[in-house]
Amino acid sequence: MLGWGARPEGSRLSRPGCTDRSLSGVPCRAMSDQHEEEAGKDAAFASEHLAAESMAADMDPWVVFDARKTPRAEFEQWLQTYQPSRVFRFGDPEGHTEPVGWIAVYGPSFCPEGGDVVGLQEDWEWLQLSGRHITFDTIKELALNRRVLTGKWLMHLDSGFKVDHAWCGIARAVLDGRIGVAKVSPCCPDSERKQVICVYTDDFTDEEQVLLADAVIRATGIKCLLSYKPDVYTYLGIYRDNRWHLCPTIYESKFDLECIPRRSRIINKVSNTEVT
C-alpha cells in the first residue's frame, strides 16, 4: 500500500486552502460522493453522517495530476505509483503516510465552474420555509439561478484490479481531453465498501453532454452500472431516503451486452423514460 512517500513530479499534494482541493472552485462538500449509494441500504446511516464523511475526505490532502501544468511524459509513472487500491484513505501510521482524500486528474482544458453555492444554500433555506412543494424541477430552478450546474457519473467498484484497471482508462481519457476531470476514492482496507470513480460534466441540465460522457466512459471498457448525480443535490444534503422523496441520481446507465452493437441503456429517473 502507498500513502504519500516520495511523489513523482506529476503528483500534487493539495491541502485545505489550496485551489486544487476543489474541482469546481467552490467549497468542496459537493464533490464527495464516496458513500452516497450506500445511504439507502441503512436508514440509520443519516445524511448528516454522510455529509461529515464527505467533508472530511474533501478537506484531507488530494493526490492530483494536473495536465495543465505537468508534462505528459510523467503521467504513466504517476498512474502506476498512485493506483487507487494501493493508496490508503486514512494513511499508514507505521509507514508515516498521511490520509488521502481523493486521487484526481485534471484535463489539459479543465476550467473550474463554481457558481454561487452560498446563494444556492440561502435560496434552499427560503424554499423550505416557503412551504412550496419540493421537486426535481424546483431544485433545478435553484441550480440554474445560481449557476451550480456540475454533475458526475458515479461507478462503484471492488478494490484491487477492477478499480485500478477502470481508473487507468478514465485517467487516460482525461489526459487526452475526452473528459474534463475525474477522481477516485482511495482504499479503506478495513471496510467492505467499494471504491468510487467520479467523472464530471459541466452542466447536468445538458442531456447531450451527460450522454456523451457516458459514451466516453463506456469506450474505456467499463461495463458496470453507472449513476449520474447533480452536485446541487449534494450541496443541499439530499441523499437517499430524504424527506422530500427525491431520488438523488437523475440518470442510470446499464451496459447492454446482448444488444448488437453493444451500448448503454440510459434511463432518465426523473421522467422514468429511456433516453438511449
Image (cartoon, grey):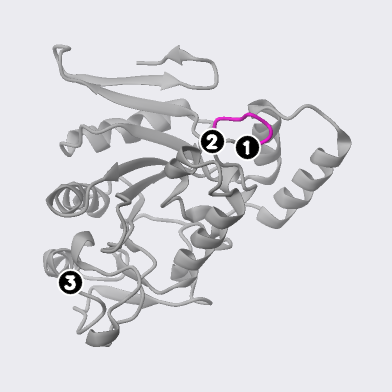
Q: Write the residue at 55% across / 41% down.
A: 43
- Taking 140 as reference, is 65 above or below it? below
Please tell me which residue lies in front, 41 or 100: 41
Three-letter amino acid code of the residue under disc 2:
Pro
Residue at the spot of label 2: 248
Q: Which quadrant would the N terminus be assigned to in this image?
A: bottom left
Q: Earlier in the sequence, mark 2 or mark 1?
A: 1
Q: Secondary structure at mark 2?
A: loop
Please tell me which residue lies in front, 236 or 170: 236
- Helix, strand or loop for the magenta stretch, by majority: loop
Residue 1, label in figure? 3
Q: Secondary structure at mark 1?
A: loop
Three-letter amino acid code of the residue under disc 3:
Met
Can residue 29 be spotted in the picture? yes
Q: Write the residue at 25% across / 76% down.
A: 3
Q: Do the numbered discs 2 and 1 sit on residues whose CB atoms are within 8 Å?
A: yes
Three-letter amino acid code of the residue under disc 1:
Asn
Q: Write the residue at 39% across / 27% down.
A: 252
Q: Name the side, left or right, on which 84 lies relative to 147.
A: left
Assess whether residue 264 is covered by the magenta stretch: no
Assess whether residue 244 is covered by the magenta stretch: yes
Q: Earlier in the sequence, mark 3 or mark 2?
A: 3
Q: Earlier in the sequence, mark 1 or mark 3?
A: 3
Circle 1 crowding by C-alpha within 10 Å: few under 14, some 14–19, many from 20? some
Please tell me which residue lies in front, 248 or 208: 248
Which one is in front in this view, the residue at disc 2 or the one at disc 1?
1
Horizontal and vertical percent for residue 95? 22, 85
Horizontal and vertical percent for residue 212? 34, 31
Residue at the spot of label 1: 242
Q: Which quadrant would the C terminus be assigned to in this image?
A: top left
User: Magenta segment range?
Assistant: 243-247
